[in-house]
Image (spheres, rainbow, N blue to C red):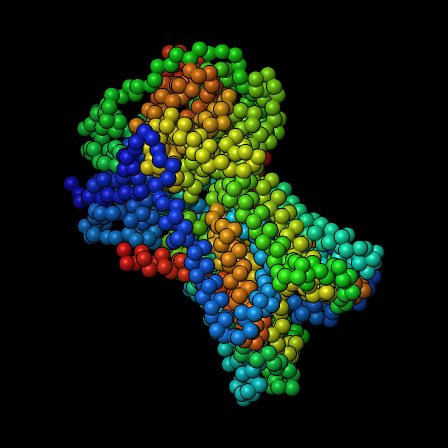
Amino acid sequence: MTDMSSAGRQLPDRLDNPLKSAVLSWESLLVLVALAIFVGNSFASPYFLNPWSLSDLTFNFTEKGLIALAMALVIITGEIDLSVASIIALASTLMGFALHTFGVPTPVLVLVGVLTGLGCGAFNGFLVTVLKLPSIVVTIGTMSLFRGLAYIILGDRSYGGYPRDFAWFGQGYIGDSVISFELVLFAVAAVLFYVLLHHTNFGRRVFAIGNNATAAQFSGVRVDRIKFVLFCLTGLMSGLAAVLLTARLGSTRPSIAQGFELDVITMVVLGGVSILGGAGSIIGVVIAALIIGLVTFGLGLLNVPGIVMSIFTGSLLIVVIALPILYKMWKERRA
Amino acid sequence: MNRILKNREVWLALAILAVVIGVTLRFPRFSQPGNLLTIFNDTSILMMLALGQMAVILTRSIDLSMASNLALTGMIVAMTNAAFPFIPIPLLIAGCVVAGAALGAFNGILVWKLDIPPIVVTLGTLTIFRGLVFVISGGAWVNAAQMSTDFIQLQRGVFLGLPILSWFAIVVAALVYVLMTRTTLGRAFYAIGVNPTASVYTGINVGRTKFMAFVLSGAISGLCGYLWISRYVIASVEVAGGYELTIVAACVIGGVSIAGGIGTVGGALLGAIFLGVVNNALPVIGVSPFWQMAISGAAILLAVVLNARGERSKGRIILKKAEVVA
Amino acid sequence: MTDPILTLSGISKSFPGVRALHKVALELYPGEVTALIGENGAGKSTLVKTLTGIYQPDEGEIRVGGQVVSLPTAIAASNAGITAIHQETVLFDELSVAENIYLGHAPRNRFGLIDWKTMRAEAQKTLDAMAAGIDAGIPLKELCIAKKHLVAVARALSIDAQVVIMDEPTAALSQKEIEELYVLVDLLKQDGKAILFISHKFDEIFRIADRYTVFRDGEMVGKGLIKQTPQGEIVRMMVGRPVDQIFPERSATIGQTVLDVQGLSHPTEFEDISFAVKKGEILGFYGLVGAGRSEVMQAVFGMTAPSSGTMVLDGRTIAPRSPADAVEAGIVYVPEERGKQGVITGEPIFKNVSLPSLDKTSRNGFLRMVEEFKLARTYTERLDLRASSLSQNVSTLSGGNQQKVVIAKWLATLPKVIILDEPTKGIDIGSKAAVHGFMAELVAQGLSVIMVSSELPEILGMSDRIVVMREGLIIDTLDNRNLQPETLVRLAAGIAQEQAA
């Protein structure tokens, strides 16, 4: 065997121009799509460009987006968590339970929601990393289990009467501005996750696991520990989303957030994260969250019912994955 | 003897028996033949769906769109019946099977030709199919008054002491059993699940085989679309909402390995019956039906833990004395 | 003379960075065994994959029975009458032995359904004719590797194949089983099948082959009749250089014991493994494929948990429960399966190299790319890595250069003990010499090296002491002074002295 790549003694760091690859990236394509939908929306409805309706728009993606940030990392390692919506249901139910049984104050209420999420995530993580079970079956199971527990507690009743200061988490704005607390929280979380995934050792190991978990393990990466942390993180973000959603809706039913997992996964995949693991970026996920928000809001302005919107989300999920594959096949056929 | 004890169908049958005996001890009427037949009839649809799902899971795939497929074909057949009550029911049933198979083929094509992971494809079609139910019905229901008598009564007829619905399950189970054990296609489901690379060498087209599994699960979903609607005599957007997980649960409990290649018709049927028995037992022993979801979730987790214990490789067998033990 | 059944002419195949086959030719004759001879990386596996429809040649012609055929898929190859028995038996663990033999061409009854009874009976008949001693009804997973091999042969017999490719069929077999295999090969010959027998063991080739074709570095360098060609001639063609391979001179002074392993055991893989490696020493592990050497090393590296035994590193007892623990303690492992366990394909060179050293290159857990590039450059240049840039994806490198990336990755962690598992398997001769030279350099710097190898010249040329393993046990530990290759082979295969002589 001979080597066709000739060598100099001094190896350059890289050959390609980083600017050029940035322009041609999936993220820039997403930005274009987002802009197009934005322009389309502003033509479709005269109310769209009003600051308050733009602010309303953000509520369409902040809660799911928070979960998508963590889910992106889970999917990059080649795992998946289908139980996120059920975690919201259980966390919300336990918050309502704590409020109505013990009359706890708002800070404790938030703590209950977030810790429930963390606990559920840790349970998923335990099953996946300690008992070595496939995450897809585990989270299909806990998807039933967590929401099932919510049904056991609540049945067909609902919890309401959340305190005013609690409602602020889902309905409040920063000062007198039109910027909601949820949006600020999402922005902060996005920056944190961006740094975590792209600028820390932890993030580098997440990618290594997704590319080849066995080789990563053989390279001294503590694969199980990292996966466990990621499931906990996803649970935690779901708990946080439960706080926001409960505060925004002001009530809890066991059916809360039904089908959220699909929207979250769609955001992640649309954002360019490979469902097979090993590739993806937080910027992509953030833009994808924005796109989903824009689309749902735009269709809402046109009075399209929610269930029909879900056709759109479902198709988007498939089309976004199919297009690059079709493009590649088309290119190969021409070659 | 050893082989019988290693057989998980035997253990599952014993578990079901234990539940039945446990409930009977306090509520003797539970195990009267009539009630047991009712449970069987109640579980018929789940049994058929579990068999379709098993074929897909054997090929290292998953079909999360079965319940939505069922709802969509169910709505189509209900609306057709309401609009054209003169169309004979057997023709409607055939139409359901074809429509369901077509929806399954859509999943299968994406998996086969574009190589998109099945979980992504069927998560997408799960929402698309259900959204389409709304689109074609405009959100309206089709209720008993709009359906023809034949449409509703067919499955309630009794033949040899069993309702026709039960006979549907028995016939489908027999057909799937023959397919799985006696045909090239059925063995190919197993082969590509056990070892996709080796399957290619033996001349099996892996993509096409997966496609066929999706067509099968789709056809069964379509058939169950009619059976479900005519049983509960209402067609709406919410029909069988979330039921896809119950189907997967039945398979997992029945010992079908999510990693592919392992699973039997008997196991999948017992998995479904286990869920059916538990769900029927709950109201009898005075537990609220709201427990159902959590119990099936717990059952999935328990089953997958037990499956994994059996499947876990214990390293290579190199030592001579270890070979004797194994 | 009869015409060949299968003729290849002008076949070429390239991969990014590697020219695997260059205008090779091959003829196979009915009722004859043709040996395909060549070192690792000579292009034998690529040829097999081309013949079985897994790879498409870039150019060239394949003729079966005089007709030009194309083999776009494995099915096409099978339909053309070509079947292969592979190095790693690719069969179906969960299915029964009978079904493994008949999958794809099972007997049917008059309804077109699979006839299990006939299938099982036929399978049993084939197995009995081979004196395999296997019950066709049991699941394949209950058989050991050697028996699975026999099932693969039975499968080839049951298919109406004209061409049977046997790819290193004896690698995992005991001496007795190899003898049984020879009988089977004769059976296939009498059946008029053309057999391509791939091996690098000369005793086997001279025992059963009628013809030979030699590959070197992806080219065909010679062919002929075995009977008319002296062994030395073929060896010369195969290696293309004097047979005595040059191994580097070593000046390392051997010091204190660094790693001491005592009584390491595992329920099924190995038992009572005790050895010690000293500072500046290369300790060789020799044995047949599947003797349990890699399994022992992976337990030392924390990948699998041993059931008992102790390990002492530099006077401190250690019990690594994961590779991460082992690396922290100072033990690193270059795995045999480079593509699956060694490099992270899909990631660039520098990320591969820095992965275990991130704690050193980063600050407070935050990446510092400048430091990573510096680290990667330092170590890859020491190994003379051939690449276009440090951001090149490792999957586009040749096997030899991938191996250099793996070694560079570990050297950057400044280990005390480095374990190399078949370090030169499947890499070109140039890289081989580089890896050997580097091992000598490492021990000169005071590292301890454990080298698992199945290649006699390598084990004899590089080791200070040699541990021989067989069936999960250590058979002997020998000083590498005036050792005869026959001694090692005899110990590894379990052949008594008088039989070998």
The one nearer the camera, B91 or B66, is B66
The one nearer the camera, A180 or C271, is A180
Which x, y percent locates residue C154? Answer: 39, 44
The one nearer the camera, A44 or C97, is A44
Identify which residue is drawn at 55% across, 87% down: B83
Identify which residue is drawn at 21% across, 47% down: C60
Which x, y percent locates residue A180? Answer: 63, 60
Identify which residue is drawn at 26% across, 27% down: C239
Residue at the extreme front of the image, as rendered: A176
Q: Is residue C218 left or right of residue C157?
A: left
Image quadrant in which the C terminus of chain C is located: top left
The one nearer the camera, B129 or B24, is B129
Asked whether residue A91 appears in the rendered view, the answer is: yes
Q: Is residue B162 left or right of residue C26?
A: right
Image quadrant in which the N terminus of chain C is located: top left
Which x, y percent locates residue A111? Answer: 74, 51
Q: Is residue C355 left or right of residue B141?
A: left
Q: Is residue C138 above or below residue B22?
A: above
Which x, y percent locates residue C68? Answer: 20, 52
Q: Is residue C82 left or right of residue A86?
A: left
